[in-house]
Image: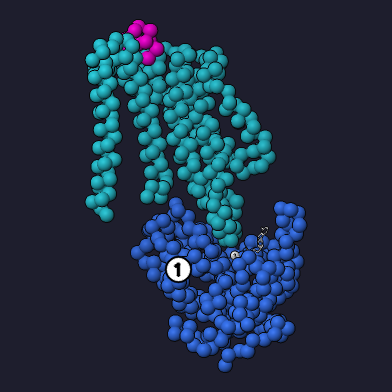
Amino acid sequence: MKPRSRIHTIEAIVYPIVGIVAVLGLWQAYVTVFAVNPIVLPGPIAIAKASVKHFDTLLEQTWPTLAESIYGFALAVLIGVPLAVCVANSRILNLTFYPILIATQSIPKVAVAPIILVWFGVGMESKLVIAFLVAFFPIVVDTATGLRATPPGLLELARSVSASPSQTFWKVQFPAAMPFIISGAKVAVTLAVIGAVIGEFVGSNEGLGNLLLAANSQLDGPLAWAALVWLSILGIGLFFLVVVAERVLMPWGHH
Amino acid sequence: MVAAPTSSQSAGPPVGGSSRSFGRFRNVHQEFLQESGKPLVAIEDISFDLAEGTLVSLLGPSGCGKTSFLKIVAGLAEATYGIVEIRGQQVTRPQPDFGFVFQQANLMPWRNVLDNVLFPMEILRRKDAAAKRRALELLALVGLSGFENARPSQLSGGMQQRAALCRALVHEPKLLLMDEPFGALDELTRMEMHDLLLQIRKVTNATTLFVTHSISEAVYLSDVIVAFSKRPARIADYIEVDLPYPRTPALRYDAAFTGLEHRAGIALGITR
Ligand SMILES: Nc1ncnc2c1ncn2[C@@H]1O[C@H](COP(=O)(O)OP(=O)(O)OP(=O)(O)O)[C@@H](O)[C@H]1O
Ligand SMILES: [Mg+2]
């Protein structure tokens, strides 16, 4: 059993790398063979070179975007989870707020971004708010779904030992909803990065999104792509933070 | 030796004032409102007494209202009318000294086995060193020593049900309510669990209501079998099981044992 699982781990590492190398190789080959203009599409090597050359700038511009994403995401969790608790536990609150929630969700965030910018200025706050707005919905919906999906057997168990409502919530309902909350958070954290970049596109003077726009307008294809790559790494990094949180918060979850 | 099958007329339980009476059920009746709006009578008229320290089985066909009755006794549901008294008190809500074993183990995947067993103590705010000691003793008794820190998902179905049994016993309940606790287990595991339950009963002495639709299980474990009719539930037969203790697997092949099985089979209408 042990050697078998080791083979699986090796496979889980080797095959993705093979896939990535293959795609990068084809990409580079295409760009080199057809001598594609780097403004249109730079090759992986050119992008890597730009990453190294502009390393300081890229790193410097990563921090604002990272902060906007994290703050927006954190705010979405801090407000979204308690709101979901209210909505899931009260029929009246559910009837009152759920339609509003759905309605606000159907507003395209990109269209709201300019208004947010007017309200909160070109600084960090407007990005944070947009990141919050896009991250908020999956957190609320998944948390509320999870809180309603408590296995009835566990609720009956709690009742059979006369657990109080708050004991039932904290010891049964909430931990049972944890997998749902985490999966909401995984979606939300990726969306938060997108929200931050939307904010930077609409108006800002810093951040990776801003750098990408600036590089694009200066026809610096490799730098624009390098910013894009860094943005992806940022998103992946934040996603893995949530995965780490998942392992800490619910060690029972991965078999 | 073998109790002759009685007519349904004389099959009623000896209703009256037993000095060791623990529970008293009189004319218990329960109706549910169906989706269609028509009432469904699940329990028509159940009356019997539960003597202290005994194990009484509720034996009946699937869907006849056994779980419904057990939940009423547990205080998890309400009878439409009728008297449901435990120690002279009408039951209206779950009591802290009741223990419930469900058909499913209902273990919490986020707790290890020990913390699952300790759940009632936590709710009762009695989770101290003594509680932990008792939980470990119970786990040892059911053969789960060494699995205290295991996750429920790492246990087999039988082991999970044993952990659930420990959880129902950890707060030393005076009344143990078991709803087909071994129904989901295979035959061999189930027979093991029977002997385990008999052994546990020697130690804990809790009065027990045991729901089952297995005739041999009812005969092997019980002091009294209350056989329910098809829905709406009424008492088809009240069978006192005067088999000696300690009960061992060989008893299953005894004439007295099969005679009681026969009588219960008649009560359920599966033989004549
Ligand atoms: N909350 C409820 N609302 C409506 N009908 C119910 C409800 N609970 C139970 N019933 C009905 O009452 C009848 C008895 O159900 P119950 O669960 O008590 O049967 P049971 O004897 O435990 O069956 P099984 O052996 O299959 O567990 C069934 O027909 C069931 O559909
Ligand atoms: Mg049942």
Q: Residue at x 36, y 30 (%)?
A: A236
The front one of A253 and A117 is A253
- List the residue tagged with mark 1: B186
Secondary structure under the numbered disc 1 in the rendered image = loop
Residue A218 drawn in magenta? yes
Q: Residue at x 37, y 39 (%)?
A: A244
Asked whether the viewer can see residue A78, the reply is no
Q: Amino acid at mark 1?
A: Asp
Q: Position of residue B58 (x, y in %)?
A: 61, 73
Q: Position of residue B176 (x, y in %)?
A: 56, 70
- Residue A187 versus residue A108 in the image, above or below: below
Q: Residue at x 60, y 67 (%)?
A: B62
- Residue B207 versus residue A42 in the image, above or below: below
- Residue A201 versus residue A102 in the image, above or below: above
Q: Position of residue B131 (x, y in %)?
A: 46, 65
Q: Colour of chain A?
A: cyan
Secondary structure mostly seen in the magenta stretch: helix
Instruction: Report the quarter where the C terminus of chain B lies.
Output: bottom right
Q: How does the figure colour the protein chain or chains?
A: by chain
Image check: A205 left or right of B126?
left
- To which quarter of the image does residue B41 belong? bottom right
Q: Position of residue B40 (x, y in %)?
A: 72, 61
Chain that bears disc 1: B
Q: Which residues are magenta?
A: A212-221
Q: Which chain is blue?
A: B
Asked whether the viewer can see residue A106, the reply is yes
Residue B124 drawn in magenta? no
